[in-house]
Amino acid sequence: KAGVTQTPRYLIKTRGQQVTLSCSPISGHRSVSWYQQTPGQGLQFLFEYFSETQRNKGNFPGRFSGRQFSNSRSEMNVSTLELGDSALYLCASSLVGGPRSTDTQYFGPGTRLTVL
Amino acid sequence: DQQVKQNSPSLSVQEGRISILNCDYTNSMFDYFLWYKKYPAEGPTFLISISSIKDKNEDGRFTVFLNKSAKHLSLHIVPSQPGDSAVYFCAASGWSGGYQKVTFGTGTKLQVIP
């Protein structure tokens, strides 16, 4: 079956702009989690959505938000971009469990965001 | 403040030998731990996990050990194979403020030499 897909794969924005990233989970998966990966901080958990509701969240500012649609597709939005937001943004889907459950998480290839 | 630390950025091991990847954490609220493997240009792949009520979990060639008193976990790969060459991330999870939080280490790059 098709894996997790993320669009776009690469994005260049300038400071102050906003950006929306999209994630399509594996068919049948209802949990979608978002992560930020940077060389200095490694992988950091942003939030998790399940059944169109944010079920878990990490320690990121309110500029980072997300939503999930009835077909489980998820979007992540970052407003008022800062240089430090440059990173690889990964989403992961699982059947029903979140990042902590025994459900295997399947990661997408990521969206590389560069903020100039 | 790095709550989950992987102090070895890289590790080289001969094929057939044991690979031991280490991870230390500082926050006592963590009670579930995971290991992920990541190949270049791909997203991380879940490998194995362990709950804090256990001290060992085994899955084929992969075993994770948890020492709660030392706040230390390790991943053992036996025997190591060239296909195991990848970056390995440990992650720790716990409840805080009504939410699950997951914190990752910065990764250890494993190279298995044929």
Image (spheres, rainbow, N blue to C red):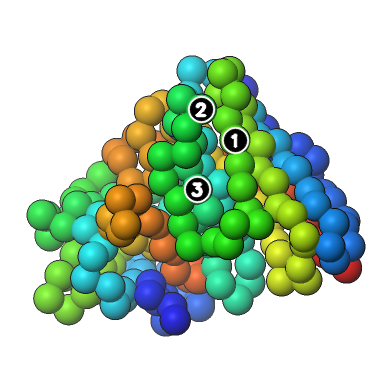
- Residue A71 quadrant: top right
Residues packed near mark 2 inside 10 Å, few (<14), some (14 to 19) or many (20 plus): some
Residues packed near mark 3 inside 10 Å, few (<14), some (14 to 19) or many (20 plus): many
Dots 3, 2 in contact, CB < 8 A: no
Question: For the residue marked with disc 1, what is the amino acid?
Answer: Arg
Q: For mark 1, name the chain.
A: A
Q: Position of residue B38 (x, y in %)?
A: 54, 54
Report the side of B64 relative to A62 (left or right).
left
Mark 1 or 3 closer to N-term?
A: 3
Q: Position of residue A75 (x, y in %)?
A: 66, 37
Residue A52, numbered label: 2
Toward the viewer: B74 or B105? Answer: B105
Toward the viewer: A56 or B60? Answer: A56
Gap between marks 1 and 3 measured at Cα: 10 Å
Residue at horizontal 58 percent and vertical 62 percent from the top: A61
The residue identified by callout 3 is: A47
Mark 2 or 1 closer to N-term?
A: 2
Residue A67, numbered label: 1
Question: For the residue marked with disc 2, what is the amino acid?
Answer: Glu
* Residue B85 visible in the shown view: no
Q: Is residue A42 above or below residue B31?
A: below
Residue at horizontal 80 percent and vertical 40 percent from the top: A8
Gap between marks 3 and 2 measured at Cα: 12 Å
Question: For the residue marked with disc 3, what is the amino acid?
Answer: Phe
Toward the viewer: B113 or A23? Answer: A23
> Helix, strand or loop at disc 3?
strand
Report the side of A73 relative to B36 (left or right).
right
Q: Is residue B50 above or below residue B12?
A: above
Residue at horizontal 50 percent and vertical 78 percent from the top: B9
Gap between marks 2 and 1 measured at Cα: 7 Å
